[in-house]
Amino acid sequence: MPRISDERRAANRAVILDAARRCFARDGFHQTSMPDLVAEAGISAGAFYRYFASKEEIVREIAHETFVNLASGLVATLERLDAPSVADVVEVITTALSAATFTADGREIDLDVQARVAVDAWGAVLRDEGLRREAGQGLRRFDAGIAGALARGQAAGRVSAGLDVADGAALVVSLLPGLILRRAAFGTDASAVGRAAAALLDAPAATRTGAHRSRTLPSASSPLSQE
């Protein structure tokens, strides 16, 4: 049998991965069988198994493909920001998660489909060491990119000097699962979180201080404490 080109092999893998995304988004990881994947991809079982030996291998490859491409795009956007505020950083994430698609290896991936797959994947991370490694690598890339952006903002006086940027990055990254779940389950537009971040995180310091004071409990000497 003649050897196929690297380009053709990559194209065949992409067909399988995209078919698997559709199956997983529709039926979930556990309810999807290998015959289901073969049928969705429209190829023979023999051809299918030349590329992937198991469903778990496909899940890990989808996770890798997503994290590599989505993380790279977000980090590249963050690196173009000279002195971002925390709200600017959140806006980069919410803008990306509000898009219809993201690009993976030169093809457009439906973000609604990927969001539904991602919800299943978070649960699988607890049981699959390979998937946990992929997720961990992706999160570390996010953490590093966000921490770098926050550090630049801090140097410019746009981010609180008291913030540990690594802790700030972990907090911002923690928004991701919630945003993805809300999109997958309820169709919520992540851009609303970006608008809220701009209103809450970039509020003038005097306004924040005033709001804090308005919540202060009355002192022992106040008239209210004597009623």
Image: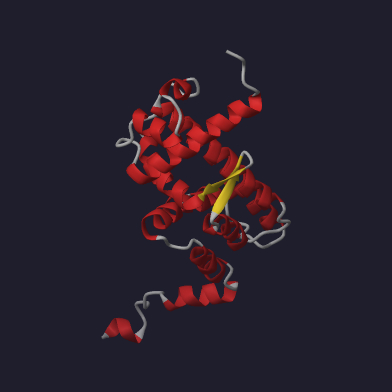
Task: Name the one closer to the observer, 141 or 58.
Answer: 58
Residue 44 falls in image quadrant: top left
Q: Position of residue 39 (x, y in %)?
A: 39, 33
Q: How is the image coloured?
A: secondary structure
Q: Position of residue 109 (x, y in %)?
A: 54, 46
Task: Name the one closer to the observer, 94 or 220.
Answer: 94
Residue drawn at x 48%, y 33% as measured from the top left: 16
Residue drawn at x 56%, y 58% as measured from the top left: 90
Residue projecting furthest to the left: 227
**Above/below status of 127 relative to 102:** above
Instruction: Give left or right: position of 227 versus 165.
Output: left
Q: Position of residue 63 (x, y in %)?
A: 49, 36
Instruction: Give left or right: position of 102 versus 46.
Output: right
Residue 42 visible in the shown view: yes
Residue projecting furthest to the front: 1
Q: Position of residue 211 (x, y in %)?
A: 48, 76
Residue drawn at x 47%, y 53% as measured from the top left: 175
Task: Name the one closer to the observer, 51 or 190.
Answer: 51
Quarter of the figure that contains the N terminus: top right
Quarter of the figure that contains the C terminus: bottom left
**Above/below status of 17 relative to 89:** above
**Above/below status of 72 relative to 111:** above
Q: How many marks?
A: 0
Residue 136 visible in the shown view: no
Task: Name the one closer to the observer, 157 or 76.
Answer: 76
